[in-house]
Amino acid sequence: MAKASEAQKITAVKVNAVSVAEVTALRPSSLRTHKFQVGQTVSYTSSPITRPGASGSYKVVKLLPSDGDDYQYRIKNPGEAFERVAKESQLELEH
């Protein structure tokens, strides 16, 4: 009887089901994605350092890279002539 080649050898492997939550929890933070997308309307809360009147409803104009701790976004309020840069932690999805 001839010896079985490596390709012919079969090893039994136990496979377990893994939930999406488990995979998400294990993936490195560098693979995390932006929480909001371009075109979404978000509620912006300004920091104590910026003008308090800046808080309100804004549209996400552009996704920006992380500043190390938080993703950033370019946002625009229809009542303002300029765009702002906001951290993800300063934004909430408007309902």
Image (cartoon, grey):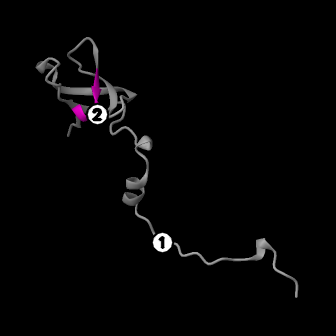
Q: Nearer the viewer, residue 82 or 30?
A: 30
Magenta stretch: give its range. 85-90
> What residue is at 42 percent from the left and 57 percent from the top?
23
Label 1 secondary element: loop
Residue 4 shown in magenta: no
Residue 73's quadrant in the figure?
Answer: top left
Reading the image, the residue beneath label 2 is 88
> What residue is at 20 percent from the left and 16 percent from the top?
79
* Residue 83 percent location from the top left of the image: 29, 17
User: Dot 1, how many residues are within 10 Å of its Cα: few (below 14), some (14-19), or many (20+)?
Assistant: few
| Cα distance in 3D space between marks 2 and 1 | 35 Å
Classify residue 4 as left or right of residue 44.
right
* Residue 19 percent location from the top left of the image: 40, 63
In which quadrant will I find the C terminus? Answer: top left
* Residue 93 percent location from the top left of the image: 24, 38
Compare marks 2 and 1 and give the one earlier in the sequence: 1
Reading the image, the residue beneath label 1 is 16
Label 2 secondary element: helix
Classify residue 90 as left or right of residue 51.
right
Q: Nearer the viewer, residue 91 or 79?
A: 91
